[in-house]
Amino acid sequence: MFPTKKTILLLLGGVILFTFISYLTDSRYQLQKPVNRQDIQPRRDNPPRRIISNRRNYVNRTTYRDNRPWTHTSNLPLAIIDTNGRWIPDEPKIPARMKIIYDESGGKNSLNSTHIHFDGQIGIEVRGQTSQMFPKKQYGFEFRDVQGNDKDVSIFNLPAESDWVLNGPYSDKTLMRNYLAYEFSNRIGRYASRTKFVELFLNDRGDKTIRSGHYVGVYLLIEKIKRGKERVDIQSLKSTHTKESEITGGYIIKIDKMDRNETFFYTQRGTHLAYVYPKGREMSVAQRLWIRDYMNKFEAVLASSKFNDPKHGYAKYIDIDSFIDHFIINELFKNTDGFRFSAYMSKERDGKLAAGPVWDFNLSSGNTVFHDGWETDSWLIYTNPVPFWWHRLVSDENFKAKLVKKWKTLRKNELATSEILDEIDRTAEFLSEAQKRNFQRWNVLGSMLFGNPGPGRLTYQGEVDEMKTWLQTRLEWMDKNIELLPQRFRYTRRNRRF
């Protein structure tokens, strides 16, 4: 039966009436009464807003044309990369040429210098995940011979190797947060990548002459984390090593973000781990199952009621001293990504799981809006979504006693406040000329970039001083609170608001 004309009109009228009533009652269309600011209660879970004058909206420049000659001299080595007009992708590496100008006697370096430290072939790619959206890119490269094969090369008196990283500090306006973390990790006796500051030039336009427009700023040359006698010193593991005496190592694994180029696995408790060495596709099925089973056993014991048994508990599976050092460096600098991203671990043949090396500290020392990272007075393991390992470890009195003892010992020497602040001052002085050119190229001082808790200071020295103040306050807080561990777990997802 078809509806009558009267029925249709009644339905249309109902629709119109419903729409009109919705319009009148929708708060978006009502007149708003003036807001009395005294009625607004501040959020107690957010810190007070930091007011910084002279804020400027910054627009990232991805292209830079300056055909003037680069006539400066630098106390930093100059690294020049020529891709023969090719754009650098994220995988695979493309062939390029690198020249390093470096006067080893301590003299200044210039583009027309005859002090050629290295001149040869490399393969280069863009690296990183979040940082790929920055106009100042991060690069991974390897030295190559004329046939295009990997080639071990020693530069700046660092141990010869083929694989390296060029880290371009961007959101870290002190330019030194990675350097400091790696430096002090090495000082406390726990290997981290060795580094060297350089000023970098990139010629990807096929130009014949290097000019100011090719300058891309201050970079930190870093040893890539890999197996090797002078890097992560563990046994070589071949796919044919499947006997019980061989299959136990060496391995390098990590907790990190998902990467399409990596092979990963999940433990039974949901921890996401990626194979670093050997690469997943180069491992036998037996090896992948063995390291996964090892991690499952470790987590099962750690989660059990007898986790702190000195013989059959977690101590059977991990190198406790390495986990203590890893905790200290990540907590001292309060690395927002610490423990949960770029968290490397290694296992030697017939040995235990060792934490480290530490990696990626751009978002540290107060330079982060995420997970209370700007605060000096909270533990990273309680404000970050880290693996449950750390909550369990610090709840064991034996682990805690060793941690407190190591911290107090280091605070008298390697991690004394004066040692840290003096190293910051020395590094700032060392970069004093180059930083000016870096921030002329990347005009970011006083601008809020990804991860920054605010626009920051308007000068380089202001950024350095702010970090020094943050670290000094952090050290004092850790001194007073390290014996109070463990604390109640209180992780909540909370970012800083302005």
Image: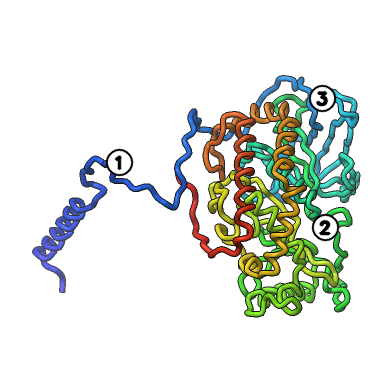
Q: Mark 3 packing: few (<14 Cα in 10 Å), some, or many (20+)?
A: many
Residue under label 2, please give it: 232
Q: Amino acid at mark 3?
A: Ser
| Residue 313: quarter of image | bottom right
Q: Nearer the viewer, residue 18 or 168?
A: 168
Q: Closer to the camera, 358 or 56?
A: 358
**Could you tell whether 251 is left or right of 13 in the image?**
right
Residue at x 11% of width, y 62% of height: 10
- Mark positioned earlier in the residue sequence (2 or 1): 1
Instruction: Determine the residue positioned at 45% across, 41% down.
Output: 49
Q: Can you see residue 182?
A: no
Q: Which residue is mark 3?
A: 110
Q: Position of residue 421 (x, y in %)?
A: 70, 39
Circles 3 and 1, Cβ within 8 Å, touching? The answer is no
Q: Earlier in the sequence, mark 3 or mark 1?
A: 1
Of circles 2 and 1, which is in front? Answer: 1
Measured in 3D between alpha carbons, the distance from the residue under mark 3 to the one under mark 1, in whole angstroms, is 58 Å
